[in-house]
Image: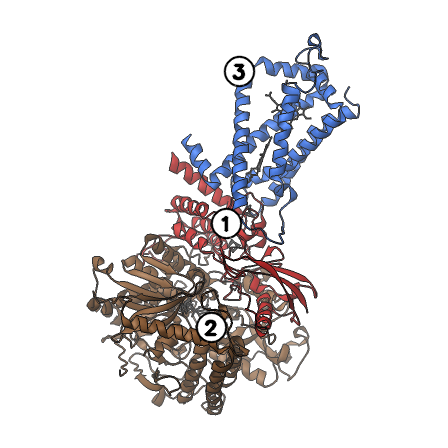
Amino acid sequence: MNLHLKVWRQKSAQSEGRLADYEARNIPEDCSFLEMLDLVNEDLLSKGEEPIAFDHDCREGICGMCSLTINGIPHGPSETTTCQLYMRKFKDGQTIYIEPFRVGAFPLLRDLAVNRSAFDRIQQAGGFVSAHVGAAPDGNAILVPKTQADRAMEAAACIGCGACAAACPNASAMLFVGAKVTHLGSLPQGQPERDRRVLAMVRQMDAEGFGNCSNYLECEAVCPAEIPNSVIGQLNRDYASALVKDTL
Amino acid sequence: MNLLLSFWRSSIGKKWLVALSGLALLGFVAGHLVGNLQMFGGPSKINAYAEFLHANEKPLWVARIGIIAAFVLHVAATITLVLQNKSARPQAYQLGRNVQAKISTRTMAYSGLTVLSFVVFHLLHYTFRLTDPRFKVIAEGGLLETSHDVYRMVLLGFQSPLVSGFYLLSVGLLSLHLSHGISSAVQTFGLESKRSAQRIRQTGRLLSGAIFVGYASIPTAVLLGFLK
Amino acid sequence: MSLTLDSNIPSGPLAGKWEKHKFESKLINPANRRKFEIIVVGTGLAGAAAAATLGELGYKVKAFCFQDSPRRAHSIAAQGGINAAKNYQNDGDSVHRLFYDTIKGGDFRAREANVHRLAEVSVSIIDHCVALGVPFAREYGGLLDNRSFGGAQVSRTFYARGQTGQQLLLGAYSALNRQIAAGSVEMHSRTEMLDLVLIDGHAKGIVTRDLVTGEIKSWAADCVIMATGGYGNVFYLSTNAKGSNVTATYRAHRRGAAFANPCYTQIHPTCIPVAGDHQSKLTLMSESLRNDGRVWVPKKKGDSRPSSQIPEDERDYYLERKYPSFGNLAPRDISSRSAKEVCDEGRGVGPGGLGVYLDFADSIKRLGEDKIRERYGNLFDIYHQITGENAYQMPMRIFPAVHYTMGGLWVDYNLMSNVPGLFVLGEANFSDHGANRLGASALMQGLADGYFVIPYTIGNYLAPAIGKRPSTDHPAFKQTESEVRAQLQRFLSIKGRRSVESFHRELGLLMWDQCGMARSERSLTKALKRIPALREEFWQDAKILGDNESLNTSLEQAGRVADFLEFGELMCLDALARNESCGGHFREEFQTPDGEAQRNDNDYAHVAAWEYQGYGQAPKRHIEPLTYEEVKLATRSYK
Ligand SMILES: Cc1cc2nc3c(=O)[nH]c(=O)nc-3n(C[C@H](O)[C@H](O)[C@H](O)COP(=O)(O)OP(=O)(O)OC[C@H]3O[C@@H](n4cnc5c(N)ncnc54)[C@H](O)[C@@H]3O)c2cc1C
Ligand code: HEM
Ligand code: HEM
Ligand code: SF4
Ligand code: F3S
Ligand code: FES
C-alpha cells in the first residue's frame, strides 16, 4: 500500500518544528507502524536526509517506550501501543499525521521523541513500598484475596507510556498516577504508606505541570494497558481522605 | 479554613471543591425548579410560595449566602483550573482528535460561562427587576398587583420571545453542563466503579434532561398560551 | 596480562557452600559503605535490584541505562514466570530438586555451586517481591498460585498474568526509585556505556555517551557492575528488544574480560512466525501456553487444508509421540529442534511452511474459554494483533526464534569477572544456565544476582580497596574518552551508501543460517569467512548521517552493529571449537542415530572462556573445568 505521511520534524527543543510531507510506498499490510517508519527512514537515508527520530524498544507492546500520536490519537487506531499497530488498519492512499506526544511536562527531544522522566519523578515521590531486602516475611504469610490481587494486577499493568497525558485535553497524568496508587493501595503490603504515597505523588504530579482531570475519559480510551478510569476515582478518594487526615 | 486552603492548593483538592460546590448548586437548581413549577398551579399557588419564602428572611439569607459562596467558589476554582489545564499543553496538536469525550464534556467552560451570564441577567430581570419597568407594583407605575405577584411578572417576562429564547438557550446549556457535571462529580468523589460507570452516566444525562424539560416548560407554556 | 580463571568456589559440601561463603565474606561497616561509589550499568532485573539493594545498604550508586527510563529494560518483556523452590503445592519440590532440574536443564554445563545457590535464594526472591507489592497470581484462598513450566514436573513457577517480567521489573524499579528519592542512587537514563576504564588492571570507571546531547563523559568508581542483558540481537531477528546489544560486554571483553560460552544460544519454540522481509523483531508467545496447548502438524507433507479440516488421525502430535512423559512440555531446545525437523520434512504450516500448530481446542473444551482467557488472555490478544487471527477459534501458528543467550562474560562465584572490580550480573554473565536455560529461571537468576548475591560478595573486593578510587582526571580516563570519540568520528566519516540496518540484517541472517538452531563445521567455516568481509564492507560503506552532538539513532546503532560484527565471529569460533552437541548448541556432526544431541563429557565438560587478542586477531580459548561433586552426569532424557 502507499501512504501520504505528514511527520513532525524538529531538530531539537530549541529549534522550530514543522510537518514534513513524505510518501511511503509499497508498504506491506503485515508491517507494524514502526516497521513502516523503518522503511521510510531507509528511503530518507538513501536520499541523504536524516532519518526520523522516534522512541521504541521492545516492539511488543510492553516496555512503553514507543510514543506516537497518529492522526491526532496517541498510539493511533490500535487497541494497544504504536508498535503493535499494524498497517492493515489503514487504507491505501490514506494521509497519516504523525506527531509527538504533546504534553508540557514531556519536553520534546527531537522529531517524535519526548522526555518522559516526569513520570519517573512522580514514581520516585512515593510509588513504592519501603521493604528491605532480606526482611520480608514468607510470601504466603499475608493472604491476599484473589479479587484484591486481581485489582492490583489490573492497575499495575500500566506500561508508563504517557499516552493518557498525551490524549487528555488537559494533559493530565491522573490515569498514570491513579494506576500506581490503586495498585499499591489494593494490597495489604501497600497500606502503611498509603496516605503518604498519594499525597507525595500528587504533589509531584502538580509540580511537574500536568493538567487536572475533568473526566474527559480520553485517557482510558487510548490506554494500551486498559487501565480503567475508576483508578482516577480511587486516586481522588484516597487523596481527599489523606489530605483531610493530614490537615486535621 | 485550613482544610479549604489545603484543598484549594492542589489539583485534586480543587477538583473536589468544584464538585462539591457544583452539587450544592445542583441542589439549588432542583429546588428552584420545584418552586417555579408552581406556576402551573396558578397565581395563588406560586405567589403564596413567594410570600412564604420572603416571610422567612433569616433562613432565606442563610441559604442565599450558601449559594453565593458555592457559586463564587465554583467559578473561581473552575476558571483557575481551566487556565492551568490550558498551560499544561503549550503546543497544540496540528491535528487533534477525541476518541470518546462527549460534546457536553468538551464545552464545560462555555456552558458554565453562559450560565454565569444568564444568572447575572436573570437576577437583574426577576430579582432586582431592573430590566423591565412593568415589574413594579401598580402604585409605582408597574403592572404587578403586589410585590409577590411573581406569576404575573413571569408571564409578562416570557411573553417576549427574545427573553424566552434566551432563557431556553440558557437552561439548555445548563442542562448540557449538568449532563457531564453530575456523573463527573460522582467520579470525582471516586464513587464510580467499572461496572456502575455506564449507569451513572446515563442517570446523569437523564436528570439533566429532566431539569431542562422542567425549566423549559415555563417559557414554552407562556409562549404557546397555556399559561395566561 | 595473563588470564586466570579462578572460580573461587568455596570448599565444603554443596548445600553449605553459600552459607559458609556468606559468613566468610568481608563485611564493610555502614559508615564506610558511604565512602564507596559503585557504577551499575543496566537497570533490568539484575541491575535495578543490585542498584537498589546496594543503595539501601548505604553505598553510593550511579546507575545507567540507554532507555528513557529504568523501567523499560528488556526484562519487562518476560511473560511466563519465575521459578522458586517454595513447594507451596506440596508436589515434591525442594531446593535440591530445583538445583537438580536446573543443572540437568543446562545439559550439565553449569557450575554446581552457582546453581545450588540460585536454588537456595529463589525462596527469598518470592518473599521479597511480594513485600514490594508485586501482584502475583493468587488462589481464591489468598495463597500464591503456581503453574508448571517447560522442563519441570512440579508446579514451582510464580506468575503475574502473562506479565511476570513486567511486574518483577516494576517491583525492582520501585525499589530503585525509593533509593533515588533517598539520594543513595543517582540515575542516568538515555546514557550508553561505550567503554570500560581500567586502572592498574582494575575496573575503575566507564565512559558514556549522553544519547540526547552526545556528550562523552567519564565516571570513576570503586568498582563497576554490568547488568546489560543478552546479545540475542546478533541474529537481528530475535525476541529481544531492538536496543538489546552486546556493546557493553563486548567492549569490556576488549579490555580484557573473558567471554564465556558465546555459542550457547537458546532458541525459543513458541514465537510468532516471520511474516515478511520488513520484519524487525520476533514476538514470543510465552511457553506457559504449552501447558494447555497441544503442538501438532499434519502427517502428510504439504497438506494445505485449513487446520479445522484435518481430521484427528491425520494429525501428528509429534512432541507427545516422541516424548511421552514430558509431551508438550519438553525442554526448549528439544521442542525447537523438533519443530525445525517437521518443517524441514515439508510438514510445516503457514506462510513459507515455517510454522507448527499450537492448538487449544481440547483445553477450551475441558476448561471452558473463560478459563483459557483468564490464563492467557493477553497472549491471545497479542497474537490477534500481530496476525489478525483469533486463536480461540483456530490453532496458533508458532515457530522457534532466538530468545536468550546463556553465554556472557565469565565470572567467578562472587560474580566478578577476571578483571578485578568488574562484576557482571543477569543475562550478561555466563554463570548459571549452562548450555540451556529452563523456562522461568532467567528472572530468578537476575533477581538472585541483584538482590541476594552481589550485596554479599561485593565486599570481598571492596573491603581491601578502600580509599583507592581514582578521579576522572586520571590519564586512563582521558585516553579512553579520546578512543571513544575517535570511534564515533570514524563512523560519521565513512559516508558510504548502505544503511547500518542492512548490515545488521545481513549479519543476522547469516548467523541464523550458519550458527543457528543447528551448526556444522561446514556452516561455521562459511560464516567465519563471510563475517570479516562483511565487517570490512561496513567500515567502507556504512552510511551514517547527522552529527554526534544530538539525538542520533543511526549513530547509536552503528556502534552496536559494529560490535555485533566482531562478536558474531567469536560466537562462530566458539561453536566450532565445541565438538559436541549440548543444550542450546547443536552440532549436526554430533547427534545420536535418532537425532538427539550427543554430549561429549570427556572432552567438553568445561567452560570455554575467550581472551581478546586484538582487532582481527584470533582470540585465545581458555577453559575452566566443571567438576561435579553432587550430580552424576547423565544423558538428558525427556522420553
Ligand atoms: C520475550 C522474552 C520473554 C522472556 N520470558 C521469560 C520468562 O518467562 N521467565 C524467565 O525467567 N525469563 C524470561 N526471559 C529472559 C529474561 O527476561 C531475561 O534474561 C532477563 O530479564 C534479563 O535481565 P537483565 O537484568 O540481565 O537484563 P535486561 O533486562 O535486558 O537489562 C539490560 C539493561 O542494560 C542496559 N544496557 C544495555 N547495554 C547498555 C549500555 N551499553 N549502556 C548502558 N546501559 C545498557 C539496558 O538499558 C537495560 O537497562 C524472557 C526474555 C524475553 C526476551
Ligand atoms: C447553577 C449553576 C451550576 C451548576 C449546577 C454547576 C454544576 C457543575 C458540576 C456538578 C460540575 C462537575 C464537577 C466535577 O467534574 O466533579 C461542574 C463542573 C464545571 N463547571 Fe459548573 N455548575 C454551575 C455553574 C457554572 C458556572 C457559572 C461556570 C462558569 C465559570 C461553571 C464552570 C464549570 C466548569 C469549567 C466545570 C468543569 C471543571 C473541571 O472539571 O475541570 N459552572 N459544574
Ligand atoms: C424558567 C426558568 C426560571 C424561572 C421562571 C425563574 C424564576 C425566578 C424568579 C421569579 C425569581 C425571583 C424570586 C423572587 O425574588 O421573588 C428567581 C430568582 C432566582 N433564580 Fe430563577 N428562574 C428560572 C430559572 C433559573 C435558573 C436556570 C437559575 C440558575 C441557574 C436561576 C437562578 C435564580 C437565582 C440565583 C435567583 C435568586 C434567588 C434569590 O433571590 O434568593 N433561575 N427565579
Ligand atoms: S495509564 Fe495507560 S496510557 Fe497512561 S501511562 Fe499507563 S499504560 Fe500508558
Ligand atoms: S482524559 Fe483527562 S480529563 Fe481526566 S478522565 Fe482522562 S485524565
Ligand atoms: S516499543 Fe515497547 S511498547 Fe512499543
Residue B178 point in image, percent of width and height: 62, 36
Mark 1 vs mark 2, CA separation in Å? 40 Å
SS state under label 1: loop
Q: Quadrant of the N terminus of chain A?
A: bottom right
Q: For numbered disc 2, what is the local secondary structure?
A: loop
Q: Which chain is blue?
A: B
Q: Viewed as shown, does residue C197 lie left or right of B158? A: left
- The amino acid type, in three-letter code, at marker 2 is Gly
Q: Nearer the viewer, residue B148 or C333?
A: B148
Q: Colour of chain A?
A: red
State whether label 1 is within 8 Å of ligand 4. yes
* C-alpha separation, residue under disc 3 versus residue under disc 1: 46 Å
Q: Which residue is mark 3?
A: B58
Residue at the far top: name it. Answer: B139
Subunit bearing disc 2: C
Q: Secondary structure at mark 3?
A: helix
Residue at horizontal 53%, vertical 41%? B83
Contact? badges 3 and 1 (CB < 8 Å): no
Q: Are marks 3 and 1 on the same chain?
A: no
Host chain of mark 1: A
| Numbered mark located on residue C150 in the image | 2
Chain C appears what colour? brown
When the figure is inspected, residue C34 is found, relative to residue B206, above or below; the finding is: below
Q: Which mark is residue A173?
A: 1
